[in-house]
Image (cartoon, grey):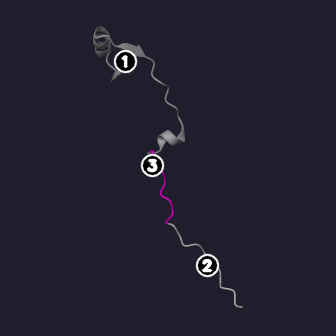
Amino acid sequence: MARLVRLNEVQYVSEEYDIKRLQDEGFTIEELEPVKDDKKQKSSGKKPDKEPDKEPDKKPDKEE
């Protein structure tokens, strides 16, 4: 997989033919950032749902 950039346009290609074609059109190859093997990236990226808000525990009223 290669990342080719021209001005503000980015193309990702894996075939050598496409890389040569895009270079002929003025694209330059940039290094791809290495993929981190963190557990965060393996997850779906969705944050776990929070528990529904509970009413705060009510303290018994003090008798006077």
Q: Which mark is residue 58?
A: 2
Q: Position of residue 42 (x, y in %)?
A: 48, 41
Question: Looking at this rendering, what residue extends furthest in the top direction?
Answer: 24
2 sits to left or right of 59: left
- Discs 2/3, front: 2
Question: Between marks 1 and 2, how big is the CA–CA gap?
Answer: 61 Å
Secondary structure of residue under mark 1: strand
Q: Quadrant of the N terminus?
A: top left
**Number of residues whose C-alpha sits closer than 10 Å to that of mark 3, classed few (under 14), some (14–19) or many (20 or more):** few
Q: Please give the residue where the numbered disc 3 appears in the rendered image.
A: 46
Pick the residue in front: 57 or 47: 57
Q: Disc 2 or 3, which lies upstream in sequence?
A: 3
Secondary structure of residue under mark 2: loop
State the extent of the magenta-drawn residues as a range. 45-52
Name the residue at 49% across, 39% down.
Answer: 41
37 sits to left or right of 1: right
| Residue 21 location, quadrant | top left
Q: Amino acid at mark 1?
A: Val
**Number of residues whose C-alpha sits closer than 10 Å to that of mark 1, classed few (under 14), some (14–19) or many (20 or more):** some
Question: Between marks 2 and 3, how big is the CA–CA gap?
Answer: 34 Å
Q: Which mark is residue 44?
A: none
13 sits to left or right of 59: left
Q: Amino acid at mark 2?
A: Lys
| Residue 10 location, quadrant | top left
Pick the residue in front: 7 or 47: 7
Q: Amino acid at mark 3?
A: Lys
Q: Position of residue 32 (x, y in %)?
A: 45, 22
Pick the residue in front: 15 or 23: 23
Q: Which mark is residue 5?
A: 1
Q: Quadrant of the C terminus?
A: bottom right
Q: Disc 1 or 2, which lies upstream in sequence?
A: 1
Name the residue at 52% across, 42% down.
Answer: 40
